[in-house]
Image: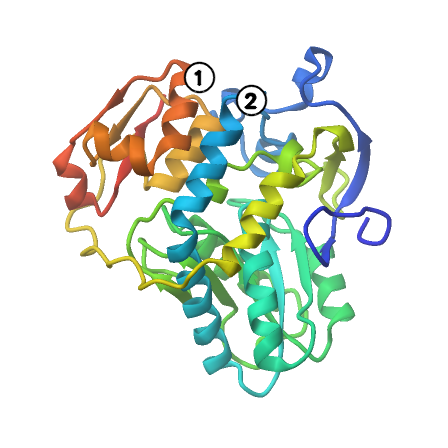
Amino acid sequence: MKDNFQSPWPNLRLYARDCGEIDPYNAANTELFRGEEAFAPAVEGWERWSKPSPEPRLDAEFEPILLDSIAHQAPQINAMARALAAKIVAANADKPPVLIAILRAGAPICALLAPILSEHYSEPIAVCAFSMFYGLGWDETALAQIIADYPNHTPIFVDGWTSGGGVARQIALSFAQWKASGKPDFTDGKAPQFAVLCDPRGVATYSAIRADFPVPSAAFTAPETLGFSRGFAREDGGLFGVYRFPKSQLKPLWIEAWLDVLNAEVTSLPPDDLPATVPAPDGFRVHVNEVTRALINRDPLEIWLRPTEAKARETLAPLLYHANKRGVPVEFGRDELANWGALAVARMK
């Protein structure tokens, strides 16, 4: 699919199987997307990930909320992207990277990193995208093709943030399986490199900060900013699939606003909170960006926020929009979340 699909993100090459175009907001297509039943304990392997995540339809109220959030966070996001790029360059001075976005949160981060890295390496930086699922692994067919397409580049996996640490664990597990099957080591004898903007779990190779920090791209929805669904596995194996979405659903203004982050005045990095002192209890999804994603494609029972209501309305407006739209109750001023190293948690079913 990488050659016949034009991504709205600059220079992004999607490695996935084209499974046709659908309208995710047409009720007739609802069953093509997974629900909470996919997370039942008995559902494992490819079957858990055999459908893409659902897409909530957004109303006109959301766009100004999202754009205001991007503008508000732009100076710090710009500083974080540049700090992250500097760490990548420092560790990979001899060979330029190929950025591999883990769909979907990795794509917007790569869009910021690539032009910064291009200045350092004095050449365009390739950006690829593929899917990975916990318990199933990465798309081996896609990764093998990426490595073949960019043989003289260092692969760096990119996501938005860490929360439960599942992506980092899955990268390590998938790489162990990769080597055990006799495939070549693409890390030059090292571990795979994994980059994120914020790493509250402390499991990434590179990050700008450790603190739980609200990244506005967590609120992006695929019809408006990707133009295709999240990947999904198929029983016959091979490339993971995606559905294309109608181009009329794209919101170029959202993407333009995100890319314009690199033109914002660079400010100091956000302060790093102390790491968690105790783990969150079972049944909670932890950290602010994961809570935003849960409100988009899961069914949380309630949300707890560490900030006061006034502060949350200033800094977490997209999250509050989704909670209000879904009818999920929100509690503010939950100071115990500091012990969990989190700004927000979601209590799940």
What is the spatial separation of the Cα atoms under label 1 and label 2, in whole angstroms?
9 Å
Q: Is residue 251 left or right of residue 148?
A: left
What's the residue type where badge 2 is placed? Leu
Query: Considering the image in quadrants, where does the C terminus appear?
Result: top left
Q: Is residue 313 above or below residue 280?
A: above
Instruction: Say few, some or many: other residues with alpha carbon within 10 Å of mark 1 (under 14 / 14 to 19 / 20 or more).
Output: few
Q: How many marks?
A: 2
**Which residue corresponds to the image point at 58% horizontal and 61% vertical from the top-left?**
177
What's the residue type where badge 1 is placed? Lys
Q: Which mark is residue 58?
A: 2
Between 312 and 162, which is closer to the camera in this rendering? Answer: 312
User: How far from the left and from the top, in percent, is residue 178?
Assistant: 62, 63
**Which residue corresponds to the image point at 63% horizontal and 32% vertical from the top-left?**
52
Which residue lies under the disc numbered 1? 325
User: How far from the left and from the top, in percent, is residue 162?
Assistant: 40, 51
Between 221 and 28, which is closer to the camera in this rendering? Answer: 221
Q: Are marks 1 and 2 in contact (CB under 8 Å)?
A: yes
